Amino acid sequence: VEASIPEPQREAWKKHSAQGFTTKEEFENETVRHVETTLARSLFNCDELAAYSGASLAFRDRLVIEWNRTQQRQTFADQKRVYYLSLEFLMGRALDNAMLNVGLKDVARAGLKDLGFRIEDVISQEHDAALGNGGLGRLAACFLDSMATLNYPAWGYGLRYRYGIFKQEIVDGYQVEVPDYWLDFNPWEFPRHDITVDIQFYGHVSRHQDEDGKNIAVWEGGEIVDAVAFDVPIPGYSTPTTNNLRLWSSKASKGEFDFQKFNSGDYEASVGDQQRAETISAVLYPNDNLERGKELRLKQQYFWCAASLYDIVRRFKKSKKAWSAFPDMVAIQLNDTHPTLAIVELQRILVDLEGLDWTEAWDVVQKTFSYANHTVMPEALEKWSVPVMQNLLPRHLQIIYEVNSQFLHMVEKQFPKDRDMLRRVSIIEESQPQMVQMAYLATIGSHKVNGVAELHSDLIKTTIFKDFVKIYGPDKFTNVTNGITPRRWLHQANPRLSELIASKLGGYEFLTDLTKLNELEHFLDDKDFKKEWQEIKYANKVRLAQHIMNTTGVRVNPKALFDIQVKRIHEYKRQQLNILGVIHRYLTIKAMSAEERKKLAPRVSIFGGKAAPGYWMAKTVIHLVCSVGEVVNNDKDVGDLLKVIYIEDYNVSKAEIITPASDISEHISTAGTEASGTSNMKFVLNGGLIIGTCDGANIEITREVGESNIFLFGNLAEDVEDLRHAHTYGNFKLDPDLAKVFDAIKGGRFGDANRFSALCNSIIDQGDYYLVSDDFNSYIKTHALVDEAYKDQEAWLEKCITSVSRMGFFSSDRCIQEYAEMIWNVEPLVPEQRNGK
Ligand code: CR6
């Protein structure tokens, strides 16, 4: 059915076209209208949550108008689009971001004030959209912001989990997980019940002859689940471009919902089917850097890939172009291996449904896809059991076998007689059961593979993809160092610093060209500027101290040095090194004379982050931090000299409060394990320094800010293997200072020592895989340097300002531009500016 309005009626239509507010009056109008009609409330029962809802709906209307225009513009322009497939989007709150990106926060502030509300209170009503675990999901969110800001025609595709990452409560010093049911009221999504895709699972494959006598595979039987689209508008900063994030939700298929059972009275069974279908998009797997091979997870992956590809292919087919033009119109970026099945699904669509030759189709596939790797740690690399895949996706497994067979043929020609090479690069690992190695499949099916920081990109070429570099040559592998959006991570999280910088640089251009921060170096002698900078840092620390007081009841001194480590809890990230260092500090303070103590700089050690629910060792680390805090924070000898804090439920909105308040932050992973890290960038951009290892993006941060502005310590990645080898073969000697720390733990200073024995033993007598002992001395010494440096506040401040001025490189805008030019080959579509925008 033709859905478009006939020509003669279009004028009437246009006359009534929605405009969205621009003035304070209009904003108030829209907000009150939504509170009164959409929410059916009145001025007699409008609390902060209702005000938040009303204001959000007013902003949403604005966004959706620009969203519609953007979609039309992109359709008319008929140019290449990029599709960013990510199983995680860690978006955080949307209202503040929308206000700032459309440039109407001041209008909203004044409007809300008229209506009786403080904007901060309204903003903080919003529930974080927490559809991600950590860095990988937050990177996807930063990329969406940059793609819209730079006017790229780009779509994000993900899953609409009913439960995002769990909420963390700390009860008696232990992590307790609470489900994150976040969809009660979410004004930022548009259900698109008209966009529903049938997704098939299980069944079997048979062969048929088509009319031309061609032998084709037909995937039949099994079950069908519906994928329903939910759209989230993504506003660019200071541009009308508003892109789309499409999230799929699972639902029992109408055709499938068993009316037979239903009518025959087996109501329960038929509702059971319904629930089973809805389970697919019910919950985000809460592991960071760990894969567990659960069938439901594979179902999630296929469900989302198949729905997204159906959508992308449908859009392409409207253009009536030849299939060979597909890669000229479509770039699909795989965020890690989670969407690798999209490669197989496109091949299936082209060969089985559209009748292309295998080779022709595979050429299209390879030109379309690119793959970003985010880890080299073996436990995080995805492998799916062949029997599981055979059962769930029989046709896809056949295609994988065929891709593998052709690939191995090619390799054999290139490296005749190298049987071991064939074994090593085979997509199918010959284990019990056989496994499909997704990273290999992703590499073979893509035209580019990238790592996320220089060291990491070098490492993938010498470790997991070493043979693939020989096969394809080095050019297939490249680096795109991660970045963060300065809109959220400076302008939104640290408005006063952003404003101060703008006042010096003559405007907010640095928010879209972060290299402009360079000019801050001219103000290193400007006393007023420096004083204000310091005041802002202090105010941010006061704000965090207040949050700590409210949530933990512990009073911390905002004049103390704030030392922060917030990220997922993981042995490789070495929060255990941090807390063991804290204990060392505590023991040192206890052994000091009153005179000596006076010379010491007071410290607050702040930890935060979630442990995967099944990760016992990580949970033990949390418990150790809390137990140490319990003792230290109540020790009269210590007072303000040391406080140890665990901030509950670290997430994006908490990060916006925590990051601007740091003096120093910890990025202390075992060298070679942290692919990039992105919170390191956030902290420095907010005027904090780093203590860190030579790992991930720390290395490039050092190059940019200069070695004298960062506190590096520890062994290098190139030495890790030898050190581990030495541990295994009996050459392990525990660091003497660390030994004293363990003595204190074992002596029960922090409560029942048994609770920490597994943690202690992993270091003392189980090989110390993460080299805590090897790096301990260097870590302690470097912290002593931090103490010294902090005493000279003038010099410290200079380091901070200099570092901020050199952070331009780490904008996700730079990053997206590199992807666009080197990998996707897409051009921006710059809209005409309207109404002075
Ligand atoms: N866990 C890396 O560990 C990197 C992000 C984004 C990670 C981290 O160093 O900054 O990706 N890897 O590139 C994976 O998720 C597999 C992460 O967030």
Image: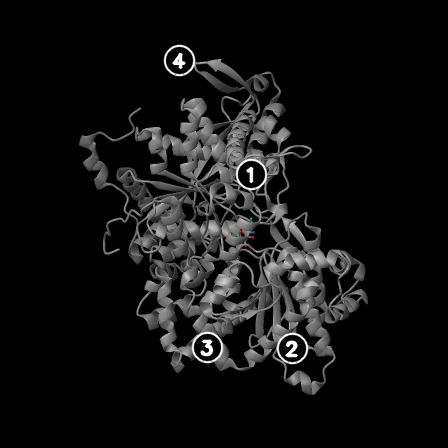
**Picture disc at residue 641:** 2
Between tags 2 and 4, which lies in front? 4
Tell me the amino acid under the disc marked 2: Leu
**Cα–Cα span, label 1 and label 4:** 35 Å
**Cα–Cα span, label 2 and label 3:** 25 Å
Q: In this figure, which residue is indicated by the disc labeled 1?
A: 438
Secondary structure under tag 3 reads helix
- Of mark 2 and mark 4, the one earlier in the sequence is 4
Colour basis? one colour
The answer to whether mark 2 and mark 3 are in CB contact below 8 A is no
Query: Residue 561: where, in percent of width, then height?
Result: 57, 74
Q: Residues within 10 Å of mark 2 (few under 14, many from 20)?
A: many
Q: Give above or below for 690 relative to 295.
A: below
- Of mark 1 and mark 2, the one earlier in the sequence is 1
- Of mark 3 and mark 4, the one earlier in the sequence is 4
Q: Is residue 172 visible from the viewing direction of this image?
A: no
- Of mark 3 and mark 1, the one earlier in the sequence is 1
Tell me the amino acid under the disc marked 1: Met
Between tags 1 and 2, which lies in front? 1
Secondary structure under tag 4 reads loop
Query: Residue 89: where, in percent of width, then height?
Result: 49, 47
Q: In this figure, which residue is indicated by the disc labeled 4?
A: 212
